[in-house]
Image (tube, rainbow, N blue to C red):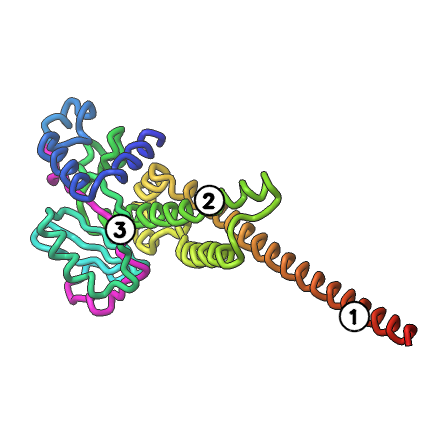
Amino acid sequence: MGELAAARSARQRRPDGARLGELQLRLALSPAPCSRGRMSGADASREPEFRPLTARAIVLGERIDAAGLERRDALSTAPLAFRVGDDGMAVVFRYGVVVLIGLDALGEDEALRRILPRVGSAFDKREEESALLAPAAGPEERVDAEGNICITDRSAARLLVVAFVLARSALLAHHERQVAGVLETVEPWAADLARTGHRRGGRGAVIRMIGSALLVEHRVSGRVAVGEKPDLLWDRPDLERLYARLETEYELDERAEVLNRKLNLIAQTARLMAELIDTERSYRLELAIVILILGEIALTLVQMAQNWAL
């Protein structure tokens, strides 16, 4: 699990073209990655049932309107899945993620040109999750030490399960980056508060920080539903084991739990900031009232002194 997480972090630091190029290079150099050291006896003579495929999940925006993309030959409607070319497949998730399987760079560009007009609130920086799908050497479906997903066949149902996990993993990575950005902004503010007892910046800066925190909390909390299993598993319980393996290897539950804890921290920090602003406002208001009262007392004393003088 740790090796996969480290490999995933390394892949996410590379440019998009480098990630796709790396997967294609691995495809060329290793035709059957999942079979190394796994075949013996009768299995050694068995040919792979399909060539290895690349799978890439891309977070395009806040949402994708799949209504205009529906086709009669669709492989699935929720999520929407359809064939691209001879061997390729595209899976469109309404929460803004598309998964492209078995496509080269030109095929991906063609699929994205059809999907991008349906994307709402498109992101400038797209989060991605890539994987190599290869035929398993035996009946066991797993993720090997190099992060390759070993499956027994490339049926639409199996590819949908893989697409579901990759899409959720990419979406989690996108949310993790958003939350990390807010926490990096909040940390200096909290450090100054702990060191000096005074907040950093003016009232406007704090209000903007509160707005950023609330915006991220709203966007992320409404879309993190990683605990939900795909509806496909109700009709195909035989794929439960594959889904459980992938869910564990990509640490979906653990990452969602950590993300929710960070969201709670952001929410608490936003409330604390708002309370500090209210306290400062109340203090200034009370100070103004005291000054007015003192001014009125001073004016009254001056008038009394003038009357006595007369």
Q: Which picture quadrant has residue 79?
A: bottom left
Disc 2, SS? helix
**Which residue matches tag 2?**
257
Disc 1, SS? helix
Give the x, y percent position of residue 210: 50, 56
Left or right, 218 with reference to 157: right
Left or right, 36 with reference to 189: left
**Which residue matches tag 1?**
296
Bounds of the magenta span? 47-73
The residue shown at (44%, 56%) is 212
Q: Nearer the viewer, residue 309 or 245?
A: 309
Give the x, y percent position of residue 160: 25, 51
Let me know if residue 269 is in the magenta part. no
Please name the amino acid that badge 3 sits on.
Arg
Q: Height in image: 250 above or below 269?
A: above
Q: Which picture quadrant has residue 97?
A: bottom left
Please name the amino acid that badge 2 sits on.
Glu
State the quadrant of the C terminus.
bottom right
**Which residue matches tag 3?**
126
